[in-house]
Image (cartoon, helix red, strand yellow):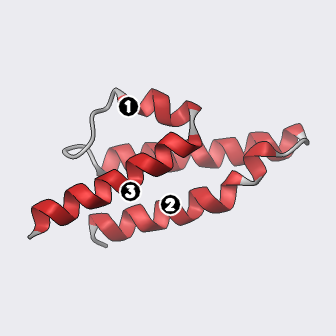
Amino acid sequence: MTPIESIYEIRSAVLDLQRHLIAKKPVVYHRAYERYEKMVERFFRESVNAVEPEKRIMCIDDVDYFLKLLEETVEYYQMYDQ
């Protein structure tokens, strides 16, 4: 799997989880948040050379920021892939 394909897979999973991250039931929120954290960890593990590790904390706290960073990283890979 290419880095871009992996990012799209992570993005899709995060978009699916996003509605559960605003759930009113604590159990649903907690499970969704655990899965979200795993997606953030996976992204930073796979994109070590493309993203500063300091951004991880902001991504954990802000889903929209993480989604934006995913898109910026795809652009980075596309730019340097040519």
The residue under label 1 is 55
Residue 35's place in the image compared with 10, above or below, is above
Q: Give the mark, 1 or 2, whose residue is nearer the N terminus.
A: 2
Q: Total marks drawn?
A: 3
Which residue type carries mark 3? Glu
Crowding near pointer 2: few (<14 within 10 Å), some, many (20+)?
many
Q: Residue at x 30, y 53 (%)?
A: 73
Residue for point 87% across, 37% down: 26
Residue 55 to residue 65: above or below: above
**Horizontal relation, residue 63 to residue 23: left or right:** left
Instruction: Give the residue number, with chain letter if any, for mark 2.
Output: 11
Does residue 82 lie above or below 75 as drawn?
below
Q: Is residue 69 above or below residue 53?
A: below
Find the distance from the CA under tag 1 to the CA under tag 3: 14 Å
Q: Kindly check if marks 3 and 2 are in contact, taking CB atoms under 8 A apart as contact.
A: yes
The residue carrying mark 3 is: 71
Task: Estimate how packed mark 3 is, as few (under 14), some (14 to 19) or many (20 or more) residues with alpha carbons within 10 Å.
Answer: some
Query: Which residue sits at x=77%, y=51%?
Result: 20
Q: Which comes before the other along the chain, label 1 or label 3?
A: 1
Q: What is the quadrant of residue 4 in the picture?
A: bottom left
